[in-house]
Image (cartoon, rainbow, N blue to C red):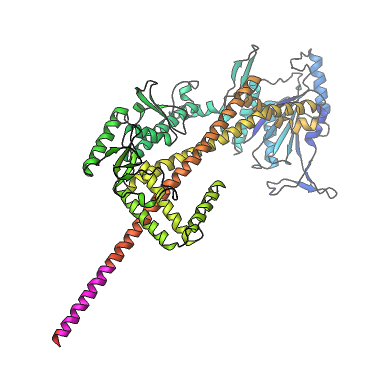
Amino acid sequence: MATVHIHAIYTRPDKAVDYGVKDKVGELRDGITNGIEYAINDKTGEAVYKTLSSYMNCKVDNAIDDFHYYANMGRGNKETKLKTKNGLEVVAWHLWQSFKGHECTPETANEIGMKLAREMFPRFPCVVSTHTNTDNIHNHIMVCAWNMDGGKWNNDNSHYRALRKTSDRLCDEYGLSVLEETRNVNLLSFVDKDGVKRYYEPTSRKNDLIKEREQGRVTGSIDDYRNTPTYETVTYKRQTNVASIQSDIDSLLPSIRSYDELLDRLRELGYIVNAKKKNGEWLRHVSFVAPMSQRATRDSAIGDGIFYTRENLTRHIENKENEKSREHGGDKITHGEGIVVDGVKYIPTYEYGRFNVSDLHEDYRVAADSGGGLVTVSRNELEKANVRSIFEREKELTTSIYDTSVLERILAEEEAAKRRKTKYVPDTQEAVLLNRLQDELRCLSFIERYKVYSLEQVNDLYKAVYDNYNRSVEELDRLDGLIEHFNEVLTLPGKAKEIERRISENADNVEYMLEDYFTDTIALRDITDTMEKYGIDTDEGIDQLNAKISDGMTSEADYRSRLLELRDRLDDYSNCMAVFSRIEHYEQEDKAKAVERFNTIRDEGASKQRNRKDKGER
C-alpha cells in the first residue's frame, strides 16, 4: 500500500540530504523482520537502524555539491520567476514513499524508489534513502530542483498524478499492495470563493458510488442525490420504520376493543399519533411517528395501503368484538353510580392494605364508562381465575400469621425500599406469601386495564413492548455515539490551530519537515475537510452544531425516561405471566389432590365392602 507525497524545500537542501542518508535512532521494536539491520547503542540502549541510500546523477560521497552546481547552472541559463505563495525559491523537492508495514525488504523498497526516480526525474540529481525505524518502511527521495540540462522541475497536478501512477505500477510489478480506491483517479476541479481554480480528489462517497454504478446497482449521474448512500440509507430506514409500525399494530390488535384504544396503546408504547383535528373530527389519514423515528408515516402507507386505514381497522376490530360477544354469550352490563353498583363494590386500587380482599367479586367488577360514570362489567375467565387465586393466597397468608403487626412491618419495609429505589427481597415466609399476593393483585389490575382475555395476548403485548424497548436502546446508543462524535468534531478547530502553529514554528527544522511534516499536513487536511463538512469553519456553523448536540441531549433524556417506563411495563407483563404460571401449577396440584382424595375414598369404600362380604361369609 505505497503512498506518495511531495513537498518543496526552500532553504538548506544540504540538511535535507544529510538527514536522509544518516542512520536513524529509536526504540527497539518487537518482531523486526525482512532483513532490517540495526545495532544497539551500549550507552543509551537505543536501536540504531541502518539507512540504505542510493544516488542518481550525483556523487555518492558529496551529492549536495552536485545539487548546488546544477542549481547555479540553471539560474545562470535564465531568470528564475518565483511563483510560490511564500515568495521563496524552490531549491529541491522531497518525495516521501511509504509502504505497508514491512511487506518488503529495505533493498526492495530502495530499488523501487530508484526506479521511480529514474522514470520521473531521469536527468535530475537524486538521493534515495530507505528508513526502517518506523512501523512502515519508507523512502525519502531528495530531488534537485534543476536537472543536468539547466531545466527546472515544477510540481503540478499532472506531475503528481504521474508520480502516484508510476509508484502504483511499480508496486504491482513487485507484488506489493496498492490503494485501489485511489488508483488512476483523476483530480476534480472547482472554483473557490475567490475565483481561483483548485483541484481535489473525489470523495470516498463518490468512489463507492462509481463502483456501485459499474456493478449496475445504481444508475444516473454520481451527483444525483438519489444515488447517494445517504439517500439509500434514509429510504431503507423509512421502509423498516413502516414495517415496525405494522408489527406493533399487529401485536396489539388481539387485545384491544376499539380503534381509539389501539391509538392509546400505541401512545403508551411511545408513539406520537396525529389522528384528529382541533374540533375533534377525524383527519383523512392517521399518521404515526414511531419512538425510534423522526418521520411520520400515514396509515395508507402501511402494509397494502388498505387494511391499516382507520376505517378498515375499525371495522376489523368491531367484527372481532362481535365474534367474542357471541362466543361468551354476551356480557351483561348494569349501569349505576356510587361506591357500590348493583351490589358490587367499586375498588379504585388493588394495593394491599388499602382495601379488603374479601370485597373482590369473582364474577363482576366496577369500571368507569366513557361518560365518567361507574358500571358493572362481567369478568372474563382469566380475571375469574386470578380472583380465585387471590382468595386462596390471602387465606394462606392470614392463616399463617397470628400477629397482624408483622404485615404492617413488611409493608413499611417495602415502602422504604421503594423510596430508596431498591428492590425489596422477602426474607421470611410471611414476606414471601405477602409478595405473592401482591403480585397477583398487580396482575389483576393489569389484565383489567388492558382487557386481556388470554395469556397469548399477554405474550403479544410483551413482545411488542420488548421490541420497542430494544429499538429504544439502539436509538439511545446511536444518540450517545452521535453526541460523542459531535463533541469530538467541536475540538477540531483547536487541533487545527495547534497543527498550524507546529508547522509554522518548525518551518526551518529539517528533521521535522522530513519526518513529521507530512503527517501533520495530512492530518490538517483531514481536519479542515471535516470542519468544512460539518460547517464549523465559521462561528455560525459552530453554533448550529452546538444546537444539534443540545437537541440530541434532549432526545437522549427522553429516551432514557421512555426506557424506564418500558422497563416497568415489561416487569408488569413478566409478573402477569409468572402469576398465571403459578395459578396453573396450583390448579394442577388441586387436581392431583382431588384425584388422590377420590382414590382414597374409592379404596376405603372397596375395603369396607370387602369387610362386609367377609363377615357375611362367616
Locate the C terminus and report the quarter of the image it occupies: bottom left
Choose top left, top right, bottom left or bottom right for residue 262. top left
Residue 545, x across and y down, in percent: 60, 25
Range of magenta residues? 596-615
Pick the front one: 17 or 269 = 269
- Our reading of the magenta stretch's main secondary structure is helix
Residue at position x 38%, y 51% in the image: 357
Q: In the picture shown, does residue 438 fall above or below 90?
A: below
Pick the front one: 283 or 149 = 283
Q: Is residue 89 left or right of residue 524?
A: right
Q: Is residue 535 left or right of residue 153?
A: left
Residue at position x 64%, y 23% in the image: 542
Residue 339, x across and y down, in percent: 36, 41
Q: In the picture shown, does residue 429 fall above or below 295?
A: below
Pick the front one: 144 or 341 = 341
Residue at position x 77%, y 32% in the image: 512
Residue 355, x across and y down, in percent: 41, 48
Residue 169, x across and y down, in percent: 60, 32
Is residue 118 visible in the rendered image? The answer is: no
Number of labels in the image equals: 0
Locate the N terminus and report the quarter of the image it occupies: top right
Say whether residue 600 is magenta.
Answer: yes
Say whether residue 94 is magenta.
Answer: no
Pick the front one: 458 or 413 = 413
Q: In the picture shown, does residue 352 fall above or below 238?
A: below
Residue pushed farthest bottom? Answer: 618
Choose top left, top right, bottom left or bottom right for residue 501. top right
Residue pushed farthest right? Answer: 43
Q: Is residue 558 left or right of residue 165?
A: left
